[in-house]
Structures are given as structure tokens and as C-alpha cells.
Image (cartoon, rainbow, N blue to C red):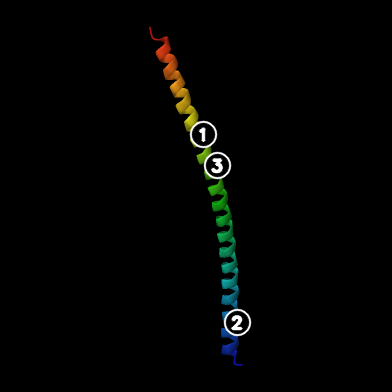
């Protein structure tokens, strides 16, 4: 193997190592983002249910207030 071939091989191995490290970092970041997305989706689902329940309560209370207002009018 010539000196030039050794240098080229060393450069290629260095690039490959950098690529592998970058690829591993991207995979880790993707995994983290996926977990955050799933957690956020679960939280959003729970919040939507809470908002729906609270909206029903507000409508019910609004109806009660309207009924009481009508009863208090002379």
C-alpha cells in the first residue's frame, strides 16, 4: 500500500467515524423528539377532555344563572 493510499484510507476512516457519530446523534434526537411528541399528544388529549367537561359545566351554570335571573325579575 502506498503512502497516498494509506492517507486516503485514514481520511476515509475518519469521515466514516464522523458520519457514524453524527448518525447516532440524529437517531438519539429523533427518539427524544418522538417521545416528546407522544407525551405532548397524551397531555393534549387530556386537556381537550378537561376543556370539554369545563365547557359543559359553564353552559350548565350559565343556564342556571339565566333561570335565577328570570325568577328574580318582578
Going from N to C along the chain, the mark reached first, 1 or 2, is 2
Q: Which residue is mark 1?
A: 53
Q: Which residue is mark 3?
A: 46
44 to 22, vertically: above or below: above
Image coordinates for residue 7, horizontal then vertical, percent: 58, 85
- Taking the spot 42% from the left edge, 14% from the top edge, the residue there is 69
Circles 1 and 2: CB atoms closer than 8 Å: no
Image coordinates for residue 27, horizontal then vertical, percent: 58, 64
Q: Which residue is mark 2?
A: 10
Going from N to C along the chain, the mark reached first, 3 or 2, is 2
Going from N to C along the chain, the mark reached first, 3 or 1, is 3
Q: Secondary structure at mark 3?
A: helix
Of circles 1 and 2, the one toward us is: 1
25 to 53, vertically: above or below: below
Q: Which of the pair 38/73 is nearer the observer?
A: 73
Residue 34 falls in which quadrant of the image?
bottom right
- Taking the spot 59% from the left edge, 92% from the top edge, the residue there is 2
Image coordinates for residue 45, horizontal then vertical, percent: 53, 44
Amino acid at each position: 500500500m502506498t503512502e497516498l493510499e494509506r492517507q486516503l484510507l485514514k481520511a476515509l476512516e475518519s469521515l466514516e467515524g464522523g458520519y457514524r457519530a453524527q448518525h447516532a446523534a440524529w437517531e438519539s434526537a429523533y427518539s427524544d423528539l418522538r417521545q416528546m411528541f407522544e407525551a405532548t399528544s397524551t397531555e393534549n388529549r387530556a386537556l381537550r377532555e378537561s376543556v370539554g367537561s369545563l365547557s359543559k359545566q359553564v353552559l350548565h351554570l350559565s343556564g342556571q344563572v339565566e333561570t335565577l335571573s328570570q325568577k328574580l325579575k318582578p
